[in-house]
Image (tube, rainbow, N blue to C red):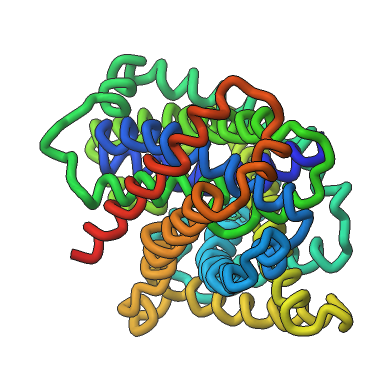
Amino acid sequence: MGFILAAAGSAVGLANVWKFPYMAYENGGTFVLIYLLCLLVIGFPLLIGEMLVGKASGKGLFEAFGELGKPLWNNFGYLCILSGVLILGFYCVVGGWCFFYAGSYAMQGMGVAEVPGFGDYTGNGWQQILSTFAFVAVTIGVVMAGVMRGIEQMVRYLMPLLGILLLVFAGYATSKVGFSVVTDQLFTYNPDTLNGETVLKAVGHAFFSLSLGIGAMLVFASYLKEDNIVKAGLWVGVIDTAVALVACFVVIPMVLLIQKQGGQVDEGAGALFVAVPALLSDFAGGNWLNMLFFFLLSCAALTSSVSLFEVVASGLHSRLSPEGDPRKYNWIMGAFVMVLALITSLSVGANESISKLNLFTHFDDAVTLYLLPLGGLLIAIFVGWLMPESIIKQHFGKRAIYPVWRGIIRYVTPLAMGLILLQSFL
Ligand code: PHE
């Protein structure tokens, strides 16, 4: 249970609630359908593959592959560190937005301050800096305090609450425009929009959302004792996908509605922060509901950022000085992530010259479109072709799906990933 909680806590986060709905809206049904296909053909098999490497070796980022006989592959850890730092660079900015909205709705509820609109807020340098600072500081604080039990409790009790809230919001929002309007937008396949870019975005998002290709699942599984990899992987995948789809039924109807009423929702990344307040403006207790929602979302974001931070910092520690004090690496990492995230926070409109660099989007794209898929490809090759099959069988357990999984991870996943990555460079 501890493993499923930790892995689900890492997987379910901003990728599901903040990012997937606006991507689904912008890229349409073709993207969503390809995303679901990618989960089946690439996401699930790789999730199990990455967990196998962790469980079979019982080791972390820089030792797992060596333990399984391929020391050169330990350098995979560097890729994970690069991806991890870049993700934290923009993830903490969005986490800060959630903090800010939770806090300002509480203030508005008490009648002390007004909540600014999304554009005004992201254009305000001081507010950006303060929110991002707070999110990074809390992430570092949680890691430093070593309160993993606390994280488990958060996932166990608060995440289901976020799920219920999302379901209720989804029901209400969808009733405003009609169920079929949303499903049409979400699931209609349009061959004209089927191209390499859409496929790459879908695969990349599958990696980002499942926390794959970055060694996180590997590290969690290295603590795993029992043989329930397949079941655990399946649970994590199903929960992650369910949350993402439900979030679409909250955001998309509201975006459609706002547009129908002549309003503009052009800021993709801001869709969630516009949609939920618009939905809740119908209610007398709207401020407090908004506060509760953004608070729970902040918790979901934190369980992801903490897992990411831990994986990278512990990797650095084991690589650079396994004997030394691990806290030192938390501080070094923390300082680095803080500076990076603060600069990124000014790139969404607050500072003209930083905004021109488009750091936020570049970090996001670099990781989701290239680094995580590359990590995934490497894991598929390793598990499918280099890891001794006897070890795999020992940890996979006796399951009828073994031959299917093996065929997919050996042939389908590497081929699909290779082609997708190749075409993106052409
Ligand atoms: N999967 C997390 C989310 O959905 C983000 C994440 C990616 C966390 C990679 C850890 C590692 O928000």
Q: Nearer the viewer, residue 216 or 272?
A: 216
Which quadrant of the structure image shows residue 423? Answer: bottom left
Q: Residue at x 80, y 61 (%)?
A: 142
Q: Is residue 74 left or right of residue 373?
A: right
- Is residue 111 at all visible to an observer of this figure? no
Residue most extreme to the left? 192
Quarter that holds the N terminus:
top right
Q: Position of residue 323 (x, y in %)?
A: 88, 81
Q: Residue at x 32, y 21 (%)?
A: 183
Q: Residue at x 62, y 66 (%)?
A: 70
Q: Nearer the viewer, residue 356 or 304?
A: 304
Q: Is residue 174 above or below residue 153?
A: above
Q: Is residue 163 above or below residue 332?
A: above
Q: Position of residue 58 (x, y in %)?
A: 78, 54
Quarter that holds the C terminus:
bottom left
Q: Is residue 332 left or right of residue 254?
A: right
Q: Nearer the viewer, residue 69 or 372?
A: 69
Q: Is residue 294 left or right of residue 41?
A: right
Q: Residue at x 82, y 35 (%)?
A: 226
Count of all numbered marks drawn on residues in the image: 0
- Is residue 337 at all visible to an observer of this figure? yes
Q: Is residue 347 above or below residue 254?
A: below
Q: Position of residue 189 (x, y in %)?
A: 21, 27
Which quadrant of the structure image shows residue 69? Answer: bottom right
Q: Nearer the viewer, residue 329 or 416?
A: 416
Q: Position of residue 129 (x, y in %)?
A: 57, 74
